[in-house]
Amino acid sequence: MSLINENFLELQESYLFSTVAKKVAKFAEEHPDKKIIKLGIGDVTRPIAKACIEAMHKAVDELGTEEGFRGYGPEQGYDFLRNAIVENDYKARGIDISSDEVFVSDGAKCDCGNIVDIFAKDNVVAITDPVYPVYLDTNVMAGRSGKFNKEKQVYENIVYLPVTAQNNFEPELPKQKVDLIYLCFPNNPTGTVLTKEQLKKWVDYAKENNSIILYDAAYEAFITEKNIPHSIYEVEGAKDVAIEFKSYSKTAGFTGVRCAYLVIPKTVKGYTKTGEKIELNKLWNRRTCTKFNGVSYIVQRAAEATYSKEGKKEIKANIEYYLENAKIIREGLIKAGYEVYGGVNSPYIWLKVPGNMTSWEFFDKLLAEKNIVGTPGSGFGPHGEGYFRLTAFGTRENSIEAIKRI
Ligand code: MLT
């Protein structure tokens, strides 16, 4: 008899964005005449930068030649990309990371999900609430969550750190000791940020408690304000306690191309039950070599091109385009009387649902009456109830049209 991983039975309904997609598909089928504007899932709409397209074409041609053919690449990523990451994303910010601390992958979602493999089941996990559902669900799958409490809408072994307007979207340090802490800034879904000083409290907490911070910096390119760290390693001491996730999805438009990376400094250590310190970099490297054969050469050349002069210029223009959408949506909503957060250092706009409606009721109303799709806040956790997320990743035309309709 094949026994299943029963942790999967603890997961709640379907994955948030699949539920949203199903509801929208049903509405579209029933109302074929309606022009639906999708500002739900954070998927990009701008074409991929020319510099990246050219790099991919060139790589394809190379693979068709005797001298340019490549089979399996290094599991951790080609040196040309790992070095470019170190130079541009770290050295340029005064951060000392070496290329063997960088692991290239096919997406930050996969990295955030897979990283749980190297940690013991008994770790206490803390997540901010609301949160990107991948952090929670992958820990449920790994058996770290305990049972789901239907009434409170929380798992019994997970520590939830509310981020709401009441605390200005700054999570409080946990009262109890936690081992793994997921932080994402600029935040998905709230679009809010932490300053270096605010982030330092977390690094200090992690150092005092021998915890690890899993820092998702997928949206750092959207930061516009000063004193907001682009990498957790800008914070003193973070290289001892933090793993950082970065993605080319939202910056270079690689949601379909797939490329990301994570950084595990060799100074980040975990513990055995007997208290022996172990480099997490070694464990992740071992896992990577066993379970992954690397990102395709073509895609890695495209990622490398994001750091070229042309690539940087084109990507900056795309990010500015989305930030302008964010401004249009944010200011439009404020003008329409909504309470609005995010959208300044982030492509996400987080709004308070009007009246006493739940997030899902507002979702249904917006879809039915204005034919606009967003993401209900409660889908990101119990403290997301009463909020709603819109993304700035749509086209300019749709962003303007959505605000007109609202
Ligand atoms: C989101 O909408 O939150 C993101 O698109 C999800 C993701 O990046 O996987």
Image (cartoon, rainbow, N blue to C red):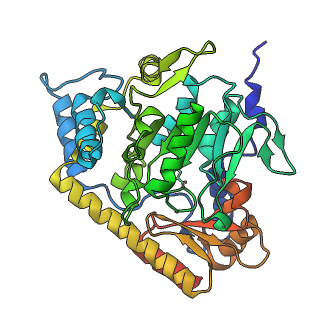
Image side of residue 19 versus residue 318, left or right: right
The residue shown at (28%, 31%) is 98
Image side of residue 202 versus residue 8, left or right: left
Is residue 24 among the parts visible in the rendering? yes
Image side of residue 144 versus residue 291, left or right: right
**Residue 321 x %, y %:** 35, 69
Q: Quadrant of the C terminus?
A: bottom right
**Residue 301 x %, y %:** 24, 39
- Which residue occupies the foreground of this view, 8 or 278? 278
For residue 71, above or below residue 328: above
**Residue 220 x %, y %:** 40, 54
- Which residue occupies the foreground of this view, 351 or 394? 351
When asked about the image quadrant of residue 89, the answer is top left
**Residue 47 x %, y %:** 32, 59
For residue 151, above or below residue 208: below
The residue shown at (26%, 55%) is 49
Q: How many marks do you count on the picture?
A: 0
The residue shown at (59%, 86%) is 336
* Outermost residue, left side: 67
Q: Quadrant of the N terminus?
A: top right
When asked about the image quadrant of residue 83, the answer is top left
Is residue 32 among the parts visible in the rendering? no
* Outermost residue, right side: 151
For residue 294, above or below residue 238: above
The residue shown at (71%, 28%) is 143
